Image: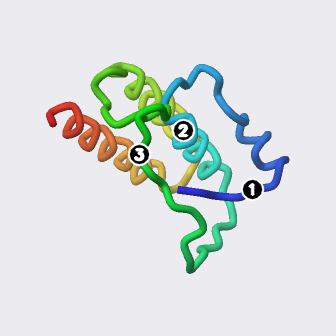
Amino acid sequence: QGYAVRRKFFNDAGAWNPAMLVWDDWELGVRLLLGYPRIVPVARVLADVYAQEQSITGISFSPKAGEWELALKRASECIADSDHPRKRHLLNMVDYRRVILAAHYRR
């Protein structure tokens, strides 16, 4: 859920998208991934994440229905417009996230 990148790489990916009201970090992560980063795994936990009612995500997805889909749509567009060799795999990843979102709505 966390990453560290050089400022130039961050800016080259387009930085934060102010139009994204939810999942802005995830959508940015997709664009960073399309920039062919050198990924180095970290073997230990660096942060604990707790669901907070006051956070962007909150504790329920339904109140912001439609906003989540905008992030998924934007990520799909970025992937589709890329020349990434694993484009199909990445588009499938977005589709899996759509399925998970649908399950959250169903709860």
Q: CA distance from mark 2 to mark 1?
A: 15 Å
Whether the residues at callouts 2 and 1 have beta carbons within 8 Å, the answer is no
Say whether disc 1 or disc 3 marks the residue closer to the N-terminus: 1
| Residue at 40% in and 49% down | 88
Q: Amino acid at mark 1?
A: Val
In this image, 52 relative to 98: left or right?
A: right
Identify the residue under disc 2: 27
For mark 3, what is the residue? 51
Most distant residue in the bottom direction: 43
Give the class, few, some or many, for how many residues have Cα within 10 Å of label 2's Cα (few <14, many ≥20). many
Single out the mark in the foreground, 1 or 3: 3
Does residue 66 lie above or below 103 as drawn?
above
Which kind of residue does numbered mark 2 sit on? Glu
| Crowd rating for badge 3 (residues with CA inside 10 Å; few <14, some 14–19, many 20+) | few
Q: Nearer the viewer, residue 79 or 56?
A: 56
> Is 68 rendered above or below residue 31?
above
Q: Which residue in the protein does label 1 denote?
A: 5
Q: Residue furthest left?
A: 106
Q: Is residue 15 above or below residue 30?
A: above
